Image: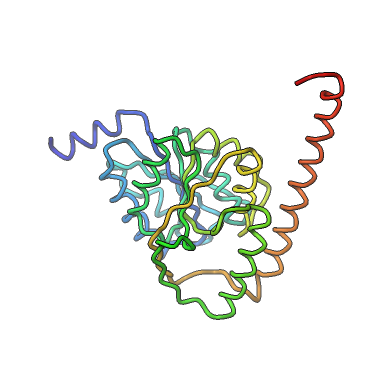
Amino acid sequence: MPPSRRGDERTSRPTLLEIVVPAHNEERRLPGGLLQLCAKLARLPFPTAVIVVDNASTDRTAEIVRSWPQESVPVRLAECTTPGKGAAVRAGLLETTAPFVGFCDADMATDLRAVERAFGLLLSGERIVIGSRAHPLAEVENRHSPIRELGAFGFRALARVLVPGVSDTQCGFKFFDGLLAREIAARLQTDGFAFDVELLARCVAGGVSVLEIPVTWHDMPGSRFSPARHSLGILLELWRIWARLRAESRGALKVKQPLDSVGYP
């Protein structure tokens, strides 16, 4: 079948998988990242789409997305004026309509071969599949400084308190049952770096298991994270997540107690 006809058939069927890409001032890395992602998705035998969320960029990020060729993989722009990766991912997930959704970083640091495995696991019944750099079979190229590594170690220790059993909450490669993703996204309140922790903690609190898969991950230049500038803010985010979930849990128990007391199941 000619490639053009194959593309027409893909776009005429309902989209099965949508991937969200948060982007803040990514004019340099986004074109290469989108090329990789669209090339990968175009080889899948079902319709897919990409949503790039422009997170208050001041460069040409939005213009790049608006002018992107709409071929076998549609790419559309969503806008989020609230600063923070968490706010951008939340906005993107709420824009989705597909039965399966995911998000990945604009630099495509995670090897996209993992997309097929994640999607296959979702089809088999898993509701959350996330990439893990801490998995024994993961391949990780890491050029971080010792100070940043120490900070990452401390963050992981704190994150495990909120999300028991998950070894890597921060890998920017997560896939979900679409209904679950939209339900959880609507409740997210963390706008910054630690939003993944709240997202996964809410899933686990709701009784949904999180499956980690090994990934091949390359340390990409251009990261904006700085231990000196961001560590205190991240600690505050983690504390707020803990306090918020604790308060919600107590509130749920208070609502439940009167029902139990009069014999409701």
Between 139 and 35, which is closer to the camera in this rendering? 139
Residue ID at (36%, 47%):
117
**Quarter assignment of residue 167:** bottom right
| Residue 261 x %, y % | 87, 24
Between 2 and 129, which is closer to the camera in this rendering? 129
Residue ID at (63%, 65%):
155
Question: Above or below — where is 45 with respect to 26?
Answer: above
Q: Quadrant of the C terminus?
A: top right
The number of numbered discs placed on residues in the rendered structure image is 0
| Residue 183 x %, y % | 59, 35
Question: Above or below — where is 253 with respect to 220?
Answer: above
Question: Above or below — where is 21 with respect to 207?
Answer: below
Please indicate whether residue 102 sits to the left or right of residue 200 in the image.
Answer: left
Colour scheme shown: rainbow
Please indicate whether residue 103 sits to the left or right of residue 12 in the image.
Answer: right
| Residue 63 x %, y % | 42, 53
Between 260 and 246, which is closer to the camera in this rendering? 260
Q: Quadrant of the N terminus?
A: top left
| Residue 109 x %, y % | 41, 62
Please indicate whether residue 236 sits to the left or right of residue 208 in the image.
Answer: right
Residue ID at (45%, 77%):
143
